[in-house]
Each structure stands twice: as C-alpha cells, then as structure tokens.
Image (cartoon, rainbow, N blue to C red):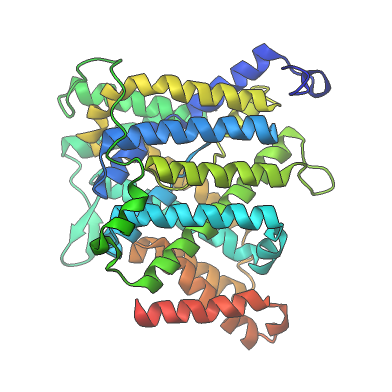
Amino acid sequence: MDRYFQFKELGTDYKTETLGGLTTFLAMAYILFVNPYYLGIAGMDEGAVFVATALAAAIGSIIMGVLAKYPIALAPGMGLNAFFTFSVVIGLGIPWQTALLGVFISGIIFIIITVVGIRELIINAIPAELKYAAAAGIGLFIAFIGLQAADIIVLSEATIVELGDFTNGATLLAVFGIIVTVILMAMGLKGGIFYGMILTAIVAVIFNLAPAPSSIIGSVPSIAPTFGAFLEPFTNPELFEINMLSLVIVILTFLFVDFFDTAGTLYAVANQAGFVKDNKLPRAQKALLADSSATVVGAVLGTSTTTAYIESSSGIAAGARSGFASIVTGGLFLVALLFSPLLVVVADAPAVTAPALIVVGILMASALGNIDWKKFEIAVPAFLTVIAMPLTYSIATGIALGFVMYPITMLAKGRGKEVHPIMYVLFFVFIAYFIWH
C-alpha cells in the first residue's frame, strides 16, 4: 500500500495521510446536510439524497485516491445543487428526474472529452475572465440564497428585496451562525464551516428553533426514491414534456461549471501540494476521469453534479500528499451514513445551513480579483455574468449573457481574431436560448 501511494517519495506516512483525510472530511462534511435540504426543495426525498450525497462523495473520493493518487476529495458541488434546484427545476419547470438525466448526460460527455483528450481545446476556447466571472457569480448566487433562507433578505413590494426583521428568532440564529463561522474561519480552524453549522444547530435546538433529533446515530435511510430516477423520463412521457433547447442549455451549463470548477480546483490544490511541474499537472486526465465518473455515479444514485472540493486544501495543509488521504475521506463519508437522524434539525431550520452558503459564497467571490476590470471589453461580459446570476436567480442565464456579450465587446474593440471559433458558436447557441427560453 505504501509503495503504491509512494509514501517514501512523497515524505509521508499512514498517520499523516489519515490525519489529512480526516481534516478534509471535517472541512466539507457540511455538504451532507446542505445538499439534501436544497435538493429537497426540488421535490426530492431528503433521506435518499443524504445517502446519495454520502455515497457519491465516498465513491468519488476513493476513485480519485486510487486512480489519480491525489489527496483531493469529491462531493456534490455547492452552486451546482443550487443551479439544479432553483434554475432548472423551479426556474425552467423541468422535473427533478429529468434534471438528474441532464446531470448524467453531462457526466458522460465529460468522460468522453476526457478520454478523447480535447480538454485543453475546450479550456483554451473560453477566456479565463469568463471562467473567473462564472465562479464569482455562483458564489454571489448561493450567498443570496443563504441570505434569503435566513430571512436576512426578504421580499419587498416597493424595492423587490429589503433587510429582514432582526427580532425574528430564525434570523438571529442565522446571524449567530454567520458570526461564529466567520470567526472560526478567520482563526484558520480546519472544518470551520462544519463546526459553525454544528454550533448553530445546537443553539437552534436549545432555543426551540429546531426540533431535537431523536438520536445521533440511526439506520441508513432508503435510497430507493432517487436511485435510478434519471431513467424515469424514458418510461414516463410527461417528464419529457419540456423545452428541449432548455434541456440542452442545462446539460451544457452542468458540463461547463463542473468542467472548469474541477479544473480550477485540481490545479489550485495540486499547486499548493507542490504537484504542478512546468505549469502542468501530472495524471490530470486520470483526475478529471475520476471527477466525471463520480458525476455519473452521483446521478444514478440521485444527486446533483459531483465535483472536486477546494476544502481538500485543508487536508493538504495538515500534511496529506497521497491518494490514501482521499480514501480515508471517502471512508468517513461512508461512516457518516449512520448520522441521518441529524437531518431533522436542518430540515426544519434553514437558518442552520444559511451561514455555510454565505461563507462558501464569500470564498468563491474571491475569483473577482483575477478579472482585469480595467479592460472594458472584458469588464462588461464579466460583470453581466456575475450580476445576472443572483438577479435572475439563474446560473445559466448569467453564463449565457456573458457568452453573448463577450464576442460583441471584443469585436467592437478590434480584438475579434482573439476570440476562439467555439465562442462564436456558443454565441449563437445562447442567442437561441434567449429567443426560445
């Protein structure tokens, strides 16, 4: 085992890798409770999604560890679950079963383009500024969702939105959670988001803002309500009575966000660990294959797109250097299946998960610093991408606006030749999306 993972060459051992895997798990364990809540809004069974989330994270992380040998864990992605629920199911009226089919198809496409080796072509076709804008826009979007869930931001007839009532118990609970989580994160505590959620849940139970769980450990919920549900559109014609162009755009958005989120995370985390050599990541194809395979598995189990987690950097900071750490993280997700009774606290108190969304949104918004705002032809599509996501409540719309405006501003600036032909093709695809949306 130690020879396979090259412990000696990497200067590590079982103890260090185990600690690193545990640290990564604690940093991303919040997804176990956040994901079921938000996919539950889409009409999915929360218990089944909890199991699907844990299994997808376990399988994805173990595949990453064994195949690519990197200490990078995977789980259903934040932002992608929000897109699944609010943009696809609620916004476009696409049944959640059909949305899962979209996730499955995007995963298959991801596998194909990874195996065929056209990854570099696609990465180079889309300008870095739009990739950063998409990441930051998703961050603002999920933070906005968190602020709404906490009733910090509420509906207003006069101004559309306004500040909520800070005498409301649930709102105060969310504010407490945000402050605690921010303090823990600022102190550099590994797993600060997870610990913040636990502390917020305890306070919620103490002040009767959420029901107390009947137990801490319980039986594993049935996954039957979501397992294989992506196939239902083929047997139930009503699930396919949708705008097919919208479904195509959904698949492209799932693919786009997962593809670049994974690529960005892989390179960022791998660079921190010292794996990147000459601006290249060894075994990158295997890492992307692990990610795309996990997305397919997750869709079959019943969850939104699975992707690499930037929280893996916490495990690397704790010393993890090999794929064994990812296997440890995956194993801990399997153990976490026994803690499903805790779901009741989150299900009845959205303010418990809201701080996690807001803080993750803050972390994702850091991508704004990588955009050259001094170049107007870049600033316009980037800004529209970022601002449209929370304002239209749609990640796809934000990406579409940016992709439509980018060729226009570049042509106006006399830089049309710098725009990749694929971007011109996508320009017309998204124009069609707006016309027939």
Query: Of 156 and 401, which appears nearest the observer?
Result: 401
Q: Quadrant of the N terminus?
A: top right
Query: Of 296 and 192, which appears nearest the observer?
Result: 296
The percent position of residue 367, horizontal first and vertical second, equals: 57, 53
Toward which corner of the image does residue 62 lie, by quadrant? top right
- Residue 137 in the image: above or below residue 353: below
- Residue 105 in the image: above or below residue 347: below
Q: Residue furthest front?
A: 235
Q: Quadrant of the C terminus?
A: bottom left
Toward which corner of the image does residue 178 lie, by quadrant? top left
Residue 352 shows in this picture: no
- Residue 149 in the image: above or below residue 1: below
The percent position of residue 407, horizontal first and vertical second, equals: 59, 80
Residue beneath the point at 65% across and 23% down: 324
Query: Of 195 and 235, which appears nearest the observer?
Result: 235
Residue 296 falls left or right of residue 236? right
